[in-house]
Amino acid sequence: MQKFVTIGYGDERGYRRTAQAVRDAAHEQDARLLRRGAVMGVAGRPVQVRNHDGKGVKTQEGAFMSSRLPVAGFAIIEAANLDAAVKMVSQVPCAVAHGVVEIWPLEQPG
């Protein structure tokens, strides 16, 4: 099985305009992913960390990247391949509630 990092983007407005039955089904999909071993979390406040040339750590509050929608949460999932990962996350809250989910293959270094 391959591991993937997912990043869900979405906002309250998009969530609220999605039918309750669709939202409920999306939360059920999250629960299924958790039962399969996914690691999930809601996005907290980010901190940027820099240590250029190993000459001292500097931190700065806030996200480095920007997006039209805020980051809502993260997950690490396992799937046979990218197509299977897409199928797994296509029914989660951010995907169905007018947001978007990015899927990043987690490749091993070296």
Image (spheres, helix red, strand yellow):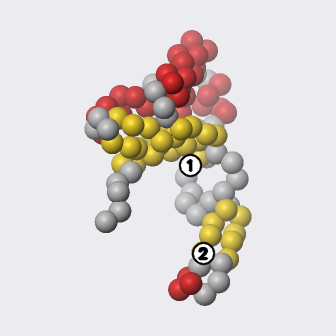
Residue ID at (53%, 28%): 34
Residue on which the image places disc 1: 68
Residue ID at (33%, 42%): 2
The three-letter amino acid code for the residue at tag 1 is: Arg
Crowding near the residue tagged with mark 2, few <14, some 14–19, many ≥20 C-alpha atoms within 10 Å: few
| Rendered location of residue 58, percent (x, y) | 67, 77
Residue 59 vs residue 70, the one in the foreground: 59
Residue ID at (69%, 48%): 44
| Rendered location of residue 16, percent (x, y) | 65, 25
If the image is split into quadrants, where does the C terminus sit?
bottom left
Residue ID at (56%, 49%): 68
Tag 1, which secondary structure?
Answer: loop
| Rendered location of residue 24, percent (x, y) | 58, 16
Tag 2, which secondary structure?
Answer: strand
Can residue 70 be seen here? yes
| Rendered location of residue 105, percent (x, y) | 36, 48
Residue on which the image places disc 2: 50
| Drawn side of residue 47 relative to residue 85, left or right | right
Vertical position of residue 62 compared to residue 82: above or below = below
The three-letter amino acid code for the residue at tag 2 is: Arg
Residue 19 vs residue 74, the one in the foreground: 74
Crowding near the residue tagged with mark 1, few <14, some 14–19, many ≥20 C-alpha atoms within 10 Å: few
Where residue 20 sits, quadrant-wise, is top right
Which label's residue is closer to the chain start, 1 or 2? 2
Residue 35 vs residue 70, the one in the foreground: 35
Can residue 22 be seen here? no
| Drawn side of residue 76 relative to residue 23, left or right | left
Query: How many numbered marks does the figure carry?
Result: 2
**Tag nearer the camera, 1 or 2:** 2
If the image is split into quadrants, where does the N terminus sit?
top left
Rounded to the nearest angstrom, the CA distance separating label 1 from label 2 is 25 Å
